[in-house]
Image (cartoon, grey):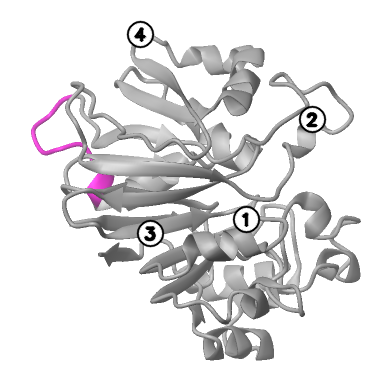
Amino acid sequence: MLRVVVLGAGAGGGVPQWNCGCEGCRAARENGHELQRTQASVAFSGDGEHWFLINASPDLRQQLNATPQLHPKAGALRHTPVAGVILTNSEVDAVAGLLSMREGSPFTVYAHQKVLAILKSNSIFNVLNEKNVQRQPISIREPFEPRLPDGARSGLEVLPFAVPGKSAWYLEGKAHPGGETGDGDTLGLKITDKSTGKCFYFIAACAEVTDALKAEIDGAALVFFDGTVWQDDEMIKAGLGQKTGKSMGHVAMSGHDGAIARLADLTLDRKMFLHINNSNPALLPDTPERKALEAAGWRIPADGTEIVL
C-alpha cells in the first residue's frame, strides 16, 4: 500500500514568509495554521514503516516533528523512519534541509549527477558523513529501487524524468559545477508501489507544460504539480520582485499556456498543486482564483495531508 504525506506545500520562504507583509502572509499570520504552509516536500512509504522524502526543505526539522509517521519508534534511543531523500533540483528550498539530518542516522541521498556536483562543490554538506549518508547518482529515464538502511529492497520504484526548468538561481552568472549542458537540474518523479502497481507523480518545478509531459502523466491516480504562481507576472505586479514565474522556472496556474488549461484534457484522478508562493491569490479561500482552481478539479493540500493509494 503506497502512502504519501504532504510535509509542506509552500514555495521558497513558505507562508507566511518571515519578512513579508503581503496579503497572503498577513492572512496566514492572522488565521493561524489553516493558511500556513512550510516549504514543499512530501514523504512516501510502501510499508508504513520506512519512508523516503522528496526534497529536504529548510523547514525539514519542523516538518519531521509535526509528522507522527516520521517520529523515532517508541523505546529507541536513536532511530528514524527516514530511509532516503530524493532530490529533484538543487534550489535552496530543496536541499537546505539536509543540514538538519547531520546527527548520524544512516540514509541515502539520491540525485542527478548535476545536483550531486553542486552538493560536492559546497563543503558545508560535508557535515553529512558519507559513511552514514551515501550519495547515489540517478539518471533520467532509468528507474531505480531505493533501498532501506540495511540494504533490503523497499518494494518501490522511482522513475526520474526531465521537465523544463533551470539551474538554481544562486548559480546565475556562475559556472555550473555539474557542467552547462544536458538535463538534470530539474526532474519530475514517478513513484510506483511494485506490489500493487499504484503510482503518483511529483513535479514541484516546471517552466512549461509540454506535450511530452502531458503524455507522461496522463492517467495518473495522483499528481503533485508546480503551483508557484497564479499569473506569470504576479510578483512584479504585487511589488514583491522583478522576476516572472517562468524566468524562475515555474509555469503559471492560469492562462492559455498555464497548468490548469494545458492539463485540462488529461485523465487525472487527483490533482494537487504544491510549491505555492505567498504571492499566489489561489492560496486564500474564497478568492476567484481559488474557486476557479477547485472548479477545474485541483486542490491545494494542507501540510500534513496523508493520501493512501
Name the amino acid type tagged 4: Lys
First in residue order: circle 2 vs circle 1: 1
- Residue toward you, 265 or 15: 265
Q: Residue at x 76, y 68 (%)?
A: 22
Mark on residue 200?
3
Depth check, mark 2 against mark 3: the one in front is 3
* Distance between mark 1 and mark 4 Cα atoms: 32 Å
**Drawn side of residue 121 relative to residue 126, left or right:** right
Check if mark 3's residue and mark 4's residue have beta carbons within 8 Å.
no
Mark on residue 171?
2
Name the amino acid type tagged 3: Phe
First in residue order: circle 2 vs circle 3: 2
Q: x, y (%) of residue 54?
A: 44, 44
Q: Secondary structure at mark 3?
A: strand
* Distance between mark 2 and mark 3 Cα atoms: 31 Å
Q: x, y (%) of residue 15?
A: 61, 61
Q: Quadrant of residue 219?
A: bottom left
First in residue order: circle 3 vs circle 1: 1
Q: Quadrant of residue 305?
A: bottom left
Q: x, y (%) of residue 248?
A: 78, 51
Q: Secondary structure at mark 1?
A: loop
Query: Which residues are the magenta region?
Result: 69-77
* Distance between mark 2 and mark 1 Cα atoms: 19 Å
- Residue toward you, 260 or 173: 260
The residue that label 1 is drawn on is: 11
First in residue order: circle 1 vs circle 4: 1
Category of crowding for the residue at label 2, using alpha-carbon neighbours closer than 10 angstroms: few (below 14), some (14–19), many (at least 20): few
* Residue 75, magenta (yes or no): yes
The residue that label 4 is drawn on is: 131
